[in-house]
Amino acid sequence: MRVALIHDWLTGMRGGEKVLEVLCELYPDADIYTLYHQRGSVSPRIERHRITTSFVQQLPFVDEHYRRYLPLFPLAIGQFRLTGYDLVISSSHCVAKSARAPRGTPHLCYCHSPMRYAWDQFDAYFGPARVGAVASRLLYGPVLRRLARWDAATADRVDRFVANSRHVAGRIRRYYDREATIVYPPVDTAFFHPAAPSLDSHDGGPPDGGPFLIVSALVPYKRIELAMAACERVGVPLRIVGSGPERDRLARKASRDVTFVGHVSDEQIRDEYRRARAVLLPGEEDFGIVPVEAQACGRPVVALARGGALETVRDGETGVLFSEATVDALAAALDRVRATRFDSGRIRHHAEQFARARHVDQMKAVIDDTLAAPSGTRW
């Protein structure tokens, strides 16, 4: 069976790429189509596939500024020719779901999120505080409104949506007027596990006074600045693992108790989880693999009580949820997590329900069900 895998862009191994990696495992001979591929940025399992890129790959300064070509993405995704395939699977948080499958070829979309900046996070990316009042209103506003209309209009190119959480399924229903099957993303709970208890002071956890931790792309909607301010308010150290366009701006605002670790290996990330007092999730996530990885390592999570965190964090049992995205609310949550003794084994057990093997089995079942349906079936 010939399979085409469509992914927005390949620039690192985040949650979307972990899903793509599973699809590559299920279909080792599949072809990959993507707007832009930063060679060497994804796993060898993905890199070994035949990867076709769009004209975006050839645009000036694309390595540093590929997101600035957002208005061209609809044109780029529409130019892929997918004839001759028996199945098209898109892994989409931007435009991949709008690829055109040939008539009679089922198109299944694993949707990480409808396009955030076009629908409900415009201000975080293109609001007046980010790009200036004039550019936000006269340039980015019209472009993103047009993109939102296009995004909704092309939802009918998908025969079946799979959402990465109940939260995203709700957004698919709201913006696309479609239902979605829920399959949580894969978390490598075999790799992410607690340290040996003998290495730590108690119950497999870090010593008292251990730092708080963020593992995240440094982009606006992650709300890193909120966590920095709350940690400064409480007087606790914060370590930030990750990179992104916000890095320099955040570093200028950081106190001396904030450490920017940068991009590190998975082994180093696992060590960071194990040493952390708790892992912070200050922004709203569609699902959020990081909180589950942290819990797989036996560490509690402090998360904003919105989005995917409501499905992955149990307040008082595997972490602490805070209701408002304010410094006061997050600071209070930090105080609460410091005063609570968590059972790392119980936290770990909760994370195991999101194991990679379960994701693989569920995706196989959804794909088989889709292929067995009569041609033209819509869910």
Image: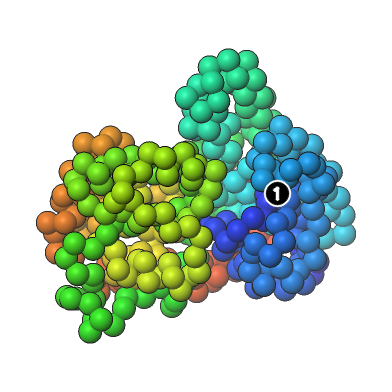
**In the image, residue 331 lies at what x, y percent?**
21, 43
Q: Is residue 29 left or right of residue 166?
A: right
The residue depicted at 63 percent of the width and 49 percent of the height is 92
Q: Is residue 259 visible?
A: yes
The residue depicted at 78 percent of the width and 41 percent of the height is 60
**In the image, residue 139 lies at what x, y percent?**
65, 20
Q: Is residue 12 left or right of residue 271?
A: right
Q: Is residue 284 visible?
A: no
**In the image, residue 270 lies at what x, y percent?**
40, 70
Q: Check the image and tell me how it is coloured.
A: rainbow
The secondary structure type at the circle numbered 1 is: helix
Q: What amino acid does circle 1 point to?
A: Asp
Q: Quadrant of the N terminus?
A: bottom right
The residue labelled by disc 1 is 63
Seen in the picture, residue 3 relative to 130 is either above or below; the reply is: below
The residue depicted at 51 percent of the width and 52 percent of the height is 243
Q: Is residue 215 left or right of residue 68?
A: left
Near mark 1 (Cα within 10 A), the count class, few <14, some 14-19 or many ≥20, is: some
Q: Nearer the viewer, residue 67 or 262?
A: 262
